[in-house]
Image (cartoon, grey):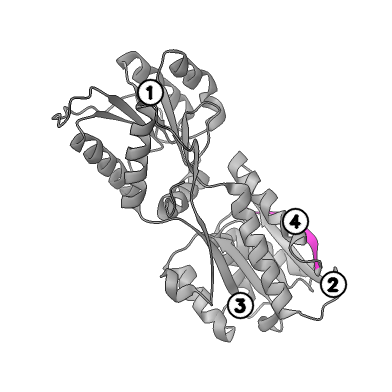
């Protein structure tokens, strides 16, 4: 299995999926480009992407296009603009154009079942990226249950270290979960596994949050009105955790001893790194996060290589999951 893939991509895609709230009514279109062939193959690949409006996804699309072009492969792009209906129409268009493979970053995986089955029935290969679809030949992304469990284990380790003499079930923790999408629910299920890693832990509250910094801060403030003895909050992502950190660091915080409080997240960026660093002297209570994989260039290479493996019938690993790395104060310098 390939390792060290998808860090920034998965982080960015998760944010985009949660932020997208409207559908575009623009006409379905496919961007085509004449490719100068550098090989004898005649493969034709369609890339169905969430959107090409953002700088990041535009950059990713350009890198994919250039990489496939260098290998002599025709590569067309269809931007769904976060509209599930538009994405279905664009995939239908790819099928009619005679593509050999569709790489899809689904707006709503459940909406694509019929059209991707149609593609499969006509011999078109399907590569799912970031979110699993019901039909695919290969998937690139994160194992969300394991992602949640990795954070839960990290939080349990902190509890064991901070409260070594605590009685079973005496350390209260809360979970800030997000369940609006299947992959989010899987991660949230993983967070709930914390009691399997420490018998000292008791989950006293599970709160649904909107997975933003503001959402985390508001949820933390509300939580402490009724659960003042909570010692740790497991957060769906690092945005939520940073919101918890903002509340605990505020003048209105009900957390008196910050050395005995922690929050944890998923995703990594400079602000998160700074917050973890500041936890050394309890200026921050952000004690750790989960990192998924490596750089954009690595991701593009893996997607290109994997897409060709599917076309050539050489798939060894169908579900290619990103490596999970627990980042705490102890190994922060090695990750940055």
Calculate the distance from the C-alpha at mark 3 to the C-alpha at mark 2: 26 Å
- Judged from the image, the secondary structure of the residue bearing numbered disc 4 is strand
Residue marked by disc 4: 206
Q: Give the image quarter of residue 62.
A: top left
Residue 242 seen by the camera? no
| C-alpha span from label 3 to label 4 | 23 Å
Q: Residue furthest bottom?
A: 281
Residue 246's mark? none
Residue 177 pos. (x, y %): 66, 53
Q: Which residue is mark 3?
A: 250
Q: Are marks 4 and 2 in contact (CB under 8 Å)?
A: no
Q: Nearer the viewer, mark 4 or mark 2?
A: 2
For disc 2, the marked residue is 170
Q: Which residue occupies 76% across, 59% down?
A: 196
Tell me the element at label 2.
Answer: loop
Q: Which residues are magenta?
A: 201-210
Residue with the mark numbered 1: 90
Instruction: Tell me which numbered mark, 4 or 2, is placed earlier along the sequence.
Output: 2
Q: Residue at x 73, y 74 (%)?
A: 160
The answer to which of marks 2 and 1 sits earlier in the sequence is 1
Identify which residue is drawn at 43% across, 27% down: 126
Closer to the camera, 184 or 140? 140
Quadrant including the C terminus: bottom left
């Amino acid at each position: 299995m390939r390792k060290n893939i998808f860090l920034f991509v998965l982080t960015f895609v998760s944010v985009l999926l949660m932020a997208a709230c409207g559908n575009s009514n623009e006409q379905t279109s496919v961007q085509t480009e004449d490719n100068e062939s550098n090989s004898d193959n005649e493969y034709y690949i369609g890339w169905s992407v969430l959107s090409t409006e953002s700088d990041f996804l535009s950059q990713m699309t350009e890198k994919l296009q250039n990489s496939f072009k260098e290998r002599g492969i025709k590569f067309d792009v269809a931007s769904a603009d976060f509209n599930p209906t538009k994405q279905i129409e664009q995939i239908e268009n790819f099928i009619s154009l005679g593509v050999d493979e569709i790489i899809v970053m689904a707006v709503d995986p459940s909406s694509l079942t019929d059209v991707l089955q149609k593609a499969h029935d006509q011999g078109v290969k399907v590569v799912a990226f970031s979110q699993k679809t019901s039909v695919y030949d290969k998937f690139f992304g994160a194992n969300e249950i394991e992602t949640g469990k990795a954070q839960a284990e990290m939080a349990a380790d902190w509890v064991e270290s901070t409260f070594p003499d605590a009685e079973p079930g005496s350390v209260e923790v809360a979970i800030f979960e997000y369940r609006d999408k299947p992959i989010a629910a899987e991660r949230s299920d993983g967070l709930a596994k914390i009691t399997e890693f420490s018998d000292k832990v008791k989950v006293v509250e599970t709160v649904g949050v909107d997975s933003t910094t503001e959402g985390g801060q508001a949820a933390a403030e509300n939580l402490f009105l009724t659960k003042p003895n909570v010692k740790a909050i497991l957060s769906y992502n690092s945005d939520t955790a940073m919101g918890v950190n903002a509340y605990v660091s505020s003048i209105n915080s009900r957390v008196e001893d910050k050395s005995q409080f922690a929050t944890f997240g998923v995703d990594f960026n400079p602000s998160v790194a700074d917050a973890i660093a500041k936890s050394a002297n309890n200026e921050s209570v952000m004690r750790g996060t989960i990192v998924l994989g490596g750089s954009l260039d690595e991701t593009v290479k893996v997607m290109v290589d994997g897409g060709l493996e599917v076309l050539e019938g050489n798939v060894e690993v169908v579900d290619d999951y990103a490596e999970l790395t627990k980042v705490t104060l102890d190994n922060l310098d090695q990750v940055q």
